[in-house]
Image (cartoon, rainbow, N blue to C red):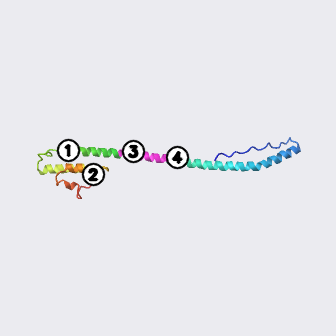
Amino acid sequence: MAYPPIPLLPSPPLITDEPAEFDTKAFTWVGALENWTASANSAGEYIDTTAGEVEADALAASNAATSASNSETAALGYRNEAEQFRNDAEAAAGDAAQIVHAPGSGCRMRRGRRMRRMRAILTQRVVRRLRRITLFSAATTRVLRRLTPSPIYRNVWGPQSVKL
């Protein structure tokens, strides 16, 4: 809605006017006051309504600023969490490399208890770190199962697996 215009009043009667002219101006001026009052009240309502809309817009802007600040804080938290997941994945990759390159892990694997235990510990370490990553997929599970070919180490994947 556009601002309602307030009409101008006719020229008021002056004390220096002749009595007949004074009366004519006075009656004309008083007659115009009714329309002028209605227009002034309409303008006041418009101003009140517009002020309410401005206050609502200011509140919405303040809420949007707070929401943006909260989103920024959450984004920083997600970034830190992603960095932690990356670090966990790098550590798991390092542990996997230790398993693959561990003495006795090749074709001529020693059958000793000590080597099997070391391989099981390293495999469990890899599994623990990868389970911290929320995007632990079925493909990752298949890769890790290939790292543990013996049924001795399969208990890492079963119901008796190590809790994180």
Q: Residue at x 73, y 45 (%)?
A: 7
Q: Earlier in the sequence, mark 2 or mark 1?
A: 1
Q: Position of residue 2 (x, y in %)?
A: 65, 45
Q: Amino acid at mark 3?
A: Leu
Mark earlier in primary sequence (2, 4): 4
User: Distance of mark 1 from mark 4, alpha carbons?
Assistant: 55 Å
- In the picture, the disc for residue 98 is 1
- Please give the range of residues in magenta: 64-80
The mark nearer the N terminus, 1 or 3, is: 3
Question: Callout 2: helix, strand or loop?
Answer: helix
In the shown orientation, is residue 86 left or right of residue 24? left
Residue type, mark 1 in image: Gln
**Can you tell which mark lies on residue 61?**
4
Query: Percent from the top left, x then y, of residue 160?
Result: 22, 58
Name which residue type carries label 2. Answer: Ala
Placement of 159 over or under 51, stated as above or below: below
Type of the residue with mark 4: Ala
**Is 79 one of the magenta-colored residues?**
yes
Measured in 3D between alpha carbons, the distance from the residue under mark 2 to the one under mark 3, in whole angstroms, is: 29 Å
How far, Cα to Cα, is label 4 from label 3? 23 Å
Residue 66 seen from this side: yes
How far apart in space, not on screen, are marks 1 and 3 (Cα)?
Answer: 33 Å
Circle number at residue 76: 3
> Which mark is drawn over residue 138?
2
Judge the density around disc 1: few (<14), some (14-19), many (≥20) Cα neighbours within 10 Å: some
